[in-house]
Image: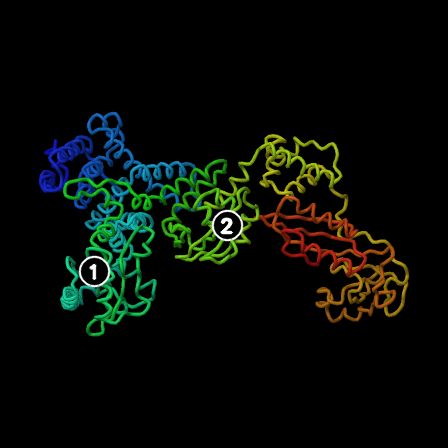
């Protein structure tokens, strides 16, 4: 069988197996040999997306994993997972390789859906039908056994290596497509899991194919100075080694750190530096036995060379989100050249190079047990995304599948802050997260019952943005639930999608009968306010796209259906439209002394509909043809833009009555004015405003409401006696809960 495999692979499988004798036992090599035979029997002439034959591609992937000293099951799964579905029938695999390996192969095969997901994310308006299911299967595979992700990362590394031999012009679109996928998803995924050994190669090769000119330019600069840099590093290593030995540190190593073009380019762009200004082109890595020696060595480095301000990072006390630990410092080395130094223990180095992969490596022939707090912390973010899928997917519309895909993409790239619980547990959150987000991240119930927070012992508002290293203490009540105001984006108390989802769920999961009753009470109040009797409520439910009245009432009770939408539906369905639109309020005729034109009372006057003046507004008259004198506010925009030839028709006007019109209109005369209210859309908003109209004895002759993105804009035409009455109403309206502004138009 193996001989057959050699007929269509470019690698010597037998020699490869022989080279593994020092790593794997005879029984484990037998598993690999059987996997190679299975690959030979079923691969036929199949090819992968790079155009390489499947057998050679799979063997290359397996060689990468074997080089990282993965367990035999993982390497065998890499040989098998790319085969056609017919060769991966579960019953056949279980019979040939056992249930554990069969399950691993099945999980690794599912990750081929990741490429399809990337394509869907790239197309802004692509159909979203199968996207959620593909993503769910991918996440399930990743969280069931993290090794399937590492197999996929090794497979993409092999794919990029194969592209190096392709013809540049003919295969350029293929090369850019694969490299683009790697840069957008696989390299960040390797970084998040801390698999540096694969991360750097994925980043460098994708950079080579996506930005060939820039890549060659930096590579040329590195090569031109390579001999000078190597000589310099040798001298620095010698000097630092002597200092460490003289100070009693033993069992250490000092090496020059290899430079990666993609990291140099990223640092140049992020900090806007030239190539000469990049500190870590010349870099050392010091490895010691324990953490105490790390800080001892750091002190020696700083005593030998002057530290560069702002260039020290302690990732031992505060590890990165993927678990990376090390001390980073930059100093002014010999000859006044910038030099970066990394200091870590040997265990930290292994963890940095392999990340979660370190837990499947062989140590002295014994497989390390996968588990413990370290690995659980590293895969917790994967499980969190899966939890979001379950939270978002229940009872939501079809657009949520795209939202989930976007959450996954954002999760790979977002900046993070790391806050502490009072017990010292580290909680990772998105940048900009608030104490309320922190509470929901710790426990859903703690979030629901949160009423306040302390940062480092000081009481702060719930919309305060957290910073890394802060200790957060949540102040909670024994019983209670969230507030609907927490969902208001303008208040800014919730920033993370997970916390907002939890709050929405809480309201949705309250007792259904209670929601129905509350909704019916609200509906009856609205019907009473609009003076509607004998309304066909089933017809109303159908108009609002609810299957029955109970569902409509429950939506009202939960707050899913706003009163503004309900009012519009009631008015459009059951209140007949007026024969003529009301442009202005009907006027009751004023007495002869209502308005004085050029000092004379009793002239035929009418109030302008454009500016709607009311006492004691400064006014001016405009002579019309056949309609008497139209009274405008003195600051009316129409008068300000009046042509010069018509300004002769303007007449001086004033309100009748005592004190310049302050008493004008206190009898039967009223004036129409337009106002506008903007508010956060909530249940009962229109009812509260309506009660205010009744208290002020103001008649409303026109209403227009619009709700959008949780905001409501309401326009009213009112009949008021004077400006004092209007001013008093606007002042009271501005204090109604949820109202942002109340103004005269």
Identify residue for label 1.
285
Which of discs 1 and 2 lies nearer the camera? The answer is: 2
Where residue 691 appears, x then y in whole percent?
Answer: 73, 47
Identify residue for label 2.
475
Q: What quarter of the picture does the C terminus occupy? A: bottom right
Residue at left offset 21%, top offset 61%: 219
The residue nearer to you, when weighing 263 against 574, is 263
Where 679 falls versus 276 (above or below)? above
The local crowd at label 2, few if under 14, some if 14 to 19, many if 20 or more residues have their Cα within 10 Å, is some
Q: Which of disc 2 and disc 1 is earlier in sequence?
A: 1
**CA gap, disc 1 to disc 2?**
45 Å
Q: What quarter of the picture does the N terminus occupy? A: top left
Q: Is residue 455 left or right of residue 586?
A: left
Where residue 279 appears, x then y in whole percent?
Answer: 26, 66
Q: Is residue 451 left or right of residue 3?
A: right
Residue at disc 2, secondary structure: strand
């Amino acid at each position: 069988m193996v001989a057959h495999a050699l007929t269509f692979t470019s690698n010597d499988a037998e020699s490869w197996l022989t080279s593994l004798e020092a790593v794997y036992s005879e029984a484990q090599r037998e598993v690999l040999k059987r996997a190679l035979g299975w690959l030979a029997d079923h691969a036929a002439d199949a090819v992968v997306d790079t155009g390489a034959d499947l057998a050679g591609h799979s063997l290359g992937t397996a060689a990468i994993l074997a080089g990282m000293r993965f367990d035999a099951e993982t390497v065998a799964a890499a040989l098998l997972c790319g085969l056609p579905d017919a060769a991966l029938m579960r019953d056949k695999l279980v019979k040939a390789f056992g249930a554990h390996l069969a399950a691993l192969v099945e999980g690794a095969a599912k990750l081929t859906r990741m490429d399809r997901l990337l394509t869907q994310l790239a197309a802004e308006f692509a159909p979203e039908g199968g996207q959620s299911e593909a993503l769910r299967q991918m996440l399930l595979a990743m969280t069931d056994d993290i090794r399937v992700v590492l197999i996929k990362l090794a497979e993409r590394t092999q794919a990029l290596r194969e592209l190096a031999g392709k013809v540049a012009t003919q295969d350029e679109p293929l090369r850019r497509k694969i490299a683009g996928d790697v840069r957008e998803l696989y390299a960040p995924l390797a970084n998040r899991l801390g698999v540096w050994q694969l991360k750097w190669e994925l980043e460098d090769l994708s950079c080579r194919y996506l930005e060939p000119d820039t890549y060659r330019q930096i590579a040329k600069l590195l090569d031109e100075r390579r001999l000078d840099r190597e000589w310099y590093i040798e001298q620095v290593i010698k000097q630092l080694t002597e200092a460490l030995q003289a100070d009693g540190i033993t069992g250490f190593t000092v090496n020059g750190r290899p430079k990666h073009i993609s990291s140099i380019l990223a640092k140049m762009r992020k900090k806007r530096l030239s190539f000469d200004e990049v500190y870590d082109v010349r870099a050392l890595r010091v490895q010691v036995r324990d953490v105490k020696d790390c800080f001892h060595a750091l002190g020696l480095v700083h005593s030998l060379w002057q530290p560069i301000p702002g260039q020290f990072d302690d990732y031992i006390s505060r590890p990165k989100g993927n678990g990376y630990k090390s001390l980073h410092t930059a100093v002014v080395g010999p000859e006044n050249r910038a030099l970066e130094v990394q200091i870590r223990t040997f265990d930290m180095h292994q963890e940095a190079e392999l990340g979660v992969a370190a837990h499947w490596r062989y140590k002295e022939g014994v497989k390390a047990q996968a588990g413990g707090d370290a690995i659980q912390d590293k895969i917790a973010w994967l499980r969190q995304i899966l939890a979001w899928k379950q939270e978002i997917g229940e009872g939501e519309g079809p657009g949520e599948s795209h939202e989930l895909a976007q959450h996954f993409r954002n999760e790979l790239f977002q900046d993070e802050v790391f806050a502490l619980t009072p017990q010292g547990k580290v909680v990772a959150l998105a940048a900009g997260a608030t104490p309320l987000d922190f509470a929901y991240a710790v426990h859903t119930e703690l979030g629901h019952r949160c009423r306040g927070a302390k940062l480092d012992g000081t009481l702060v508002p719930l919309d305060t943005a957290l910073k890394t290293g802060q200790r957060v203490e949540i102040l909670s009540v024994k019983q209670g639930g969230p507030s609907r105001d927490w969902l208001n984006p303008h208040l800014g108390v919730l920033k993370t999608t997970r916390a907002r989802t939890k709050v929405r769920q809480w309201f949705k999961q309250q007792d259904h009968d209670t929601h129905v009753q509350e909704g019916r009470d609200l509906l009856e109040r609205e019907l009473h306010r609009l003076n509607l009797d004998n309304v066909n409520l089933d017809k109303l439910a159908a108009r609002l796209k609810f299957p029955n009245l109970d569902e409509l009432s429950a939506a009202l009770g939960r707050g899913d259906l706003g009163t503004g939408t309900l009012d519009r539906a009631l008015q459009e369905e059951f209140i007949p439209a007026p024969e003529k639109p009301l442009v202005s309020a009907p006027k009751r005729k004023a007495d002869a002394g209502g308005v004085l034109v050029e000092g004379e009372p009793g002239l035929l006057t009418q109030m302008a509909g454009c500016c709607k003046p009311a006492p004691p507004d400064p006014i001016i008259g405009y002579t019309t043809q056949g309609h008497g004198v139209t009274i405008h506010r003195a600051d009316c925009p129409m008068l300000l833009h009046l042509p010069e030839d018509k300004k002769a028709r303007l007449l001086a006007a004033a309100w009748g009555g005592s004190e310049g019109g302050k008493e004008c209109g206190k009898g039967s005369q009223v004036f129409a004015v337009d106002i506008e209210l903007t508010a956060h859309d909530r249940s009962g908003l229109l009812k509260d405003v309506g009660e205010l109209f009744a208290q002020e004895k103001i008649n409303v002759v026109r209403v227009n409401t619009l709700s959008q993105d949780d905001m409501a804009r309401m326009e009213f035409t009112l009949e008021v006696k004077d400006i004092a009455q209007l001013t008093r109403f606007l002042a009271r309206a501005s204090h109604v809960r949820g109202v942002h502004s109340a103004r005269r138009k």
